[in-house]
Image: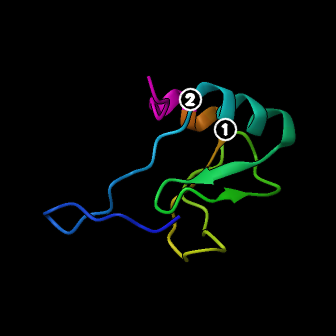
Amino acid sequence: MAIEYGKSGKIVAKRFTLEEIEQASENMTGFCRACGEEAACCEPDARNYKCEACGARQVFGAEELFLMGAVKA
């Protein structure tokens, strides 16, 4: 996925379905909030890890995403 920028020039953070987050939790993966790519070998409480796909420090673990409210309704 491509990084999306708002009018202010800031990255528009991606959100994920509860199913995606649950699956990531089972697989010990996380997601990049900048580009949406899945990140392997990611601790559940990971914060601001570097994304291998886009280089942004926006990778978060599954449980952390849930706690942050990054779940699509």
Residue visible at 51% across and 60% down? 58
Q: Which mark is residue 62?
A: 1
User: Which segment did they paint magenta?
Assistant: 66-73
Which residue is denoted by mark 2 in the rendering? 66
In-image side of 37 versus 6 (left or right): right
Kindly identify the amino acid type of the residue bearing the numbered disc 1: Ala
Q: Is residue 71 magenta?
A: yes
Q: Is residue 23 above or below residue 43?
A: above
Residue visible at 54% across and 38% down? 16
Q: Are marks 2 and 1 in contact (CB under 8 Å)?
A: yes
Kindly identify the amino acid type of the residue bearing the numbered disc 2: Phe
Chief SS of the magenta region = loop
In-image side of 51 versus 22 (left or right): left
Q: Mark 1: give few (<14), some (14-19) or many (20+) Cα within 10 Å.
A: many
Residue 63 point in image, percent of width and height: 65, 32
Residue visible at 42% across and 67% down? 3
Residue 67 point in image, percent of width and height: 52, 28
Q: Is residue 4 magenta?
A: no
Q: Secondary structure at mark 1?
A: helix
Residue 43 point in image, percent of width and height: 76, 46
In-image side of 27 versus 25 (left or right): right
Residue visible at 47% across and 35% down? 70
